[in-house]
Amino acid sequence: MSQGVWAAPGRVNLIGEHTDYNDGFVMPFALPHTTVATVARRNDGVLRLHTADTADTAGAAGGAVELRIDELAPGRGPGGWTDYPAGVVWALRDAGHAVGGADVHFESTVPAGAGLSSSAALEVVTALALNDLYELGLERWRMARLCQRAENVYVGAPTGIMDQTASACCTAGHALYLDTRDLSQRQIPFDLAALGLELLVVDTRVKHAHSEGEYGKRRAGCEAGAAALGVPALRDIPYADLPAALSRLDDPEVRALVRHIVTENHRVERVIALLEAGEVPAIGPVLTEGHASLRDDFRVSCPELDLVVDAALSAGALGARMTGGGFGGSAIVLTDVSTAPTVTKSIEEAFASGSHADPRIFPATPSKGATRLS
């Protein structure tokens, strides 16, 4: 029986939030935290899924779920985490790739619900394993596209392409500049340790229940703005033309969404320029500026994320912002290594005084993308 072990990472987005479904620019990097899949081919047309992490909720004896691959279809899955790998199998087969059954066991160190793309890691590791086992010969970017389709159509989540591309394509020691329209990529060196800097991830351990519906509303509002301005997507509004574009929009909510997307694309370009010029500490204020835009214009922050940013900056951090879709999840903090303990203590004390759950704080090291382990 042909089998092996694969891994795919979660990701942190350095800058470029909610721009990916607007054909814009993003700049994620892969985390060392991964989802590992041990996968074997099956010849009976069955997809068997099992995970040690959610065995009590997977639905069947021993935590395993068995699905017939020829019966996979959007809206017909059992729901929950199994829809992500099942959706990948459906997307591969729907695209004409000869994928048969598989036995898949998952283990993950990617924090779920933290805005660090645990779902994309689950999808990408499934796609990479099946690509190898069934000798499909798919490029990494194409696998990412199929994983996005699985999440959009099979799972029903209107996500952009960033998360899957980051998990599939990032390289160690770099941030990935991705143009989400044409999927062109550039690996931007991002070696913080060599400069005495550290990027902390702060998982607030909260996720507000209205996030999914609100995410869809933001996407619809962006599409309405693009339509009103007569462009295919908001990435087609140049930063220099933003004031004129905003003056043509009557709806204040749509105007605020447009302002965030156009300025956020510009922030990605500014960060790249600073990194390439070796002015890494100077990206801090750009990150903080991005948080203000997400909080005030896009309105996807929450009190816990704002608390992280405020506490970090008051303790001497160079910059901080929420990362991911928002309404909970995680924030990132750029700091000198020498200041990191003080920043960490400030955040922990702020959460304790506000009777919040203890945040999970860890350094983020730009790591490699999906790979075969054995």
Image (cartoon, rainbow, N blue to C red):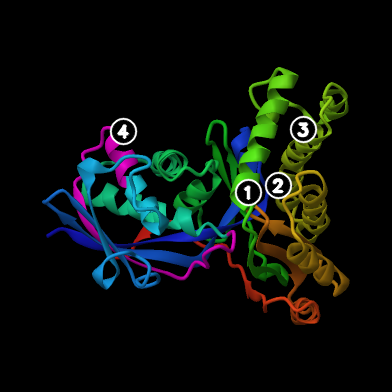
Residue under pointer 3: 254
Q: In this view, does 217 lie above or below 302?
A: above
Q: What residue type is labelled 2?
A: Ile
Residue under pointer 4: 95
**Which dot, 4 or 2, sits closer to the camera?**
4
- The answer to whether any part of residue 89 appears in the image is yes
Assign the N terminus to one quadrant of the image: bottom left
Q: Which amino acid does label 1 sit on?
A: Met
Q: In which quarter of the image is residue 362?
A: bottom right
Q: Which amino acid does label 3 sit on?
A: Val
Number of residues whose C-alpha sits closer than 10 Å to that of mark 4, classed few (under 14), some (14–19) or many (20 or more): few
The stretch of residues the image draws in magenta is 89-115
**Which dot, 1 or 3, sits closer to the camera?**
3
**Which dot, 4 or 3, sits closer to the camera?**
3
Disc 1 to disc 2: CB gap under 8 Å = yes
Secondary structure under tag 2 reads helix
Residue under pointer 1: 27
User: Gap in Å between the C-alphas at discs 4 and 3?
Assistant: 35 Å
